[in-house]
Image (tube, helix red, strand yellow):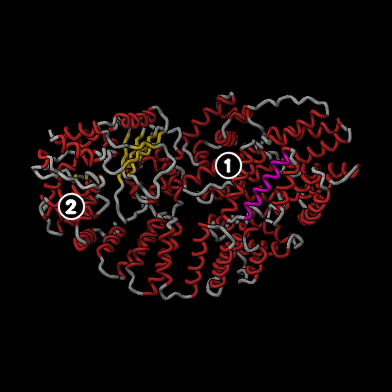
Amino acid sequence: MNHPLSASATAQVGLTGRRPESAALARVLDRARTGTSAVLVVRGEAGIGKTALLEAADTTGLRVTTVTGVESEMELPYASLHQLCATILDPLSQLPAPQSEALSVAFGLRTGPPPERFMVGLAVLSLLSAAAADRPLACFVDDAQWIDHASLQALAFVARRLQAEPVALIFAVREPSYPPVLPGLAELVVPGLSDADARTLLTSVVGPLDPLVRDRLVAEAHGNPLALLMLPRTLAPAEPGGGFWHPEGRSATSHLENAYRQQIQALPPDTRRLLLIAATDPTGDAGLLWRAVEAEGIPADAAGPAEAAGLVDFGARVRFRHQLARTAVYRGATVTQRRAAHLALAQATDPERDPDRRAWHRARAATQPDESIAADLEHSAQRAHSRGGAAASAVFLRWATDLTPDPVRRVARALSAAEAAFEVGAIDRTHNLLAVAEIGPTDDLQCARIERLRARLVSTQVRDGGTAHRLLDAAGRMAPYDAALARDTLLEALGAAIFAGRLGPGEVEVARAVRSGPPAADPPRQVDVLLDSITARIIDGHATDVGALQYTLRMLCRHHGTDAEQPADWLWLTCPVTPEPLAPELWDDAAWHELTSTAVGIVRRAGTLSVLPIALSYQANYLLHTGDFATAAALIDEATAISEATYHTPLMYTSLLLSAWRAREPESLEAIEAGVGEARHRGEGRALALAEYAAAVLHNGRGRYDAAQAAATRACAYEDLGIFGWALAELVEAAARNGDRDAAAAALDQLVPRTRASATTWARGVEARSRALLADGPAADLLFAEAVEHLERCRITIHLARTRLVYGEWLRRQNRRQDSRAQLRAAHEVFARAGADGFAERARRELTATGETVRKRHESPLAELTSQEAQIAWLARDGHSNPEIAAQLFISPRTVEWHLGHVFAKLGVSSRRHLPAALPATRSPEPA
């Protein structure tokens, strides 16, 4: 039986029983019409009706753009994204220059350095917003599981940042998909039809059937509409009325492919050949198809039977009515027939205009290794990488490896392919390519690169101390051949040891191995200076000449990523070591401020979103210590959003510190317990120390000094760079207030040499406060006053408040109530304004004990702003335009405008010119 259906008929009958799903799509499109963004992922098995739902959606009043993914091993970076945006590129020149350049290079419209992949995403977000300015926009991405990796990442980023644009972004994804496609977005799961709806659909298409046959067809289809349309075609003429049909217990997808295969086999030979060539080219390029068909001597009228059978549309683009039909054509052909089809397409492809597609088809047509094809694929990999298509580059290199006849070149290409695969997170493929490289004739440098990559592979699963040793071994093998790469690898090894901390091999052991490695270049690179100074600090301890470390900090502040090294690459390499631990290790708040703000600025300008969450988290950590919890929270939220959009695990440790300072229980305790468990699981001793330090802060704030002492003691069990000194200060306070003077004195003995070596105002203030906690009478008074004086001259406002708190507590115990109130009021004001609830309550209790009534602090309207609204408010107050704010926060200008409307309403102002009066003069206190 044969029941050809037109596309419109298929869509119409495919909507039987789909009223709830149609309504859900309508609501999404209505939101775009009313000026609000909406994103939806429609999920379901093959043939369930996802495409029919998209095609039947009412797009009246909307501008529509579409793209359909095609199953293929050919990976052309941003090909699907370019197709989706092809009709809305007019505003491209109006985008901020970095965005316009990134998208132009990605689409091959101009040449330039490889665009950062998520700068492309930001550019698409701005482009969609601009395209929807005059008319709401609906973007449909069908078969999203098959669009190229670069396009999918960019669209995932856009989907998570759309907020106030009149844009509806709707994806259709075939399930099951692995790895999961577009997780975490709003979704609509399309179920199978009910038996009643299935019978209605079957009758409307086939006509009357014997009830037994009809029920068996319904049972075999499992509610799949396309199966209901296709299964009757597999019946012999007598079967519909005879009742003796015995179906096989196969899946609906299997039945569908079989039905299409039978339909294809019934077509004329020339039509089958034409269909195979069409199915072999995933781009749907009609011009290419007809050139190949003509060269093969296939008559043009061979297309007629395929179109009449409802299998394919031969229009401006070649489009199979369903991807299963295309799959059935390709899989139903022999290997020889497939190779012939690829060869025909390769010969019909212009080598100048489309060398990458030609190289891919040549590769698929090859029957044996061929250096000319492998070289073409290698060039395609380079072009893909230059457009920001790391995933495509990795695929081309893998094909080049397979087709390389010379063993030496094969090793080189396999290693490059493995490194490219690792870059895009294709871990299994990386392992396989490394195995290919290892069995070939490798030189010593290649062996070292293999060893380095293996160490990195292990670190993706377990960040234990073994990573440091593996990187050390790799650096040792590299040293005679590439000293610069060896020293870069040594810095990675040192960073791994620092992260592993107490759970690893020991920083000193690794640092000694680093010191015995190749010397720095002349003149030294920034990485060289950093490596040598950190190594000296670890080996020689805090007593070493701090001048080298201070010089390193000054150098980093002056030249952060401005020399020959790429700023983003340099920051990525050094982030495990600096700026996070180095400035706090020296108690240098000025350098900490400069490093973190400069790092964020560099990465924002470069658009390196893969690094930005790290830089944002470090800046948030600094801001916590200035008492600016609101901005710190906003940065943490931004870092988390970017990490999720880029499929990276969000950094949890700064948010854990924020939770400890806020002391909102039980959430804070639960977060710390989770942090301890995660740190142990990942083998990150440094993170474990940070979690214990956070617990000490939490418990000191709440006045639970025994718990604080226990946590601080655990934090001090290992000298973690940049944490140990902080933890010692917590231990002095906790032990002193807990009555354990011996433990407090021992901690002070360890703290003082470190603070004196640094000799900054922050270090001097912390030392004086710690000494005062163990002193009595006039000596304590002088030390507390000295601590306040020092800390008033630096940016670390939260510790100034803590010093005033303990000073006020001491003064009250000396019955100097008037003096104590002055210190306690100042401390309480800082804690309450920042949101340090534990310390604020501790200060309030002390003030109450002096006889003072603490009025409930009037909440500023600023407290009503969300973290993102607060960021936008500050930036607008500082004179940044909406496009500038949008570029910095990775949202669209329209979303900025939308948020500013909420900001104005909450602050009681009508325009941005009123913001300076409505907001405090500074976000965080500056040193006196």
Quadrant where the C terminus is found in the figure: top right
Extent of the magenta region: 685-701
Numbered tag placed on residue 891 in the rendering:
none
Kind of residue at badge 2: Leu
Placement of 190 over or under 111, stated as above or below:
above
Residue that label 2 marks: 275
Asked if residue 509 lies left or right of residue 18, the reply is right
Residue depicted at x 55% and y 56%:
572
- Where is residue 510 drawn, in percent x and y? 63, 66
Q: Residue furthest left?
A: 238
Q: Secondary structure at mark 2?
A: helix
Q: Which is nearer the eye, 891 or 756?
A: 756
Q: Residues within 10 Å of mark 1 (few under 14, many from 20)?
A: many
- Residue drawn at point x = 70 percent, y = 65 percent: 539
Above-or-below relation of 644 to 395: above
Q: What residue is shown with label 1? A: 635
Q: Could you say where residue 81 lies in the image, as x and y percent from the top left?
A: 36, 46
Check residue 256 for magenta coloring: no
The residue drawn where x is 38% and y is 71% is: 410
Q: Is residue 694 magenta?
A: yes
The quarter of the picture where the N terminus appears is top left
Residue 904 position, x and y percent, is: 56, 26
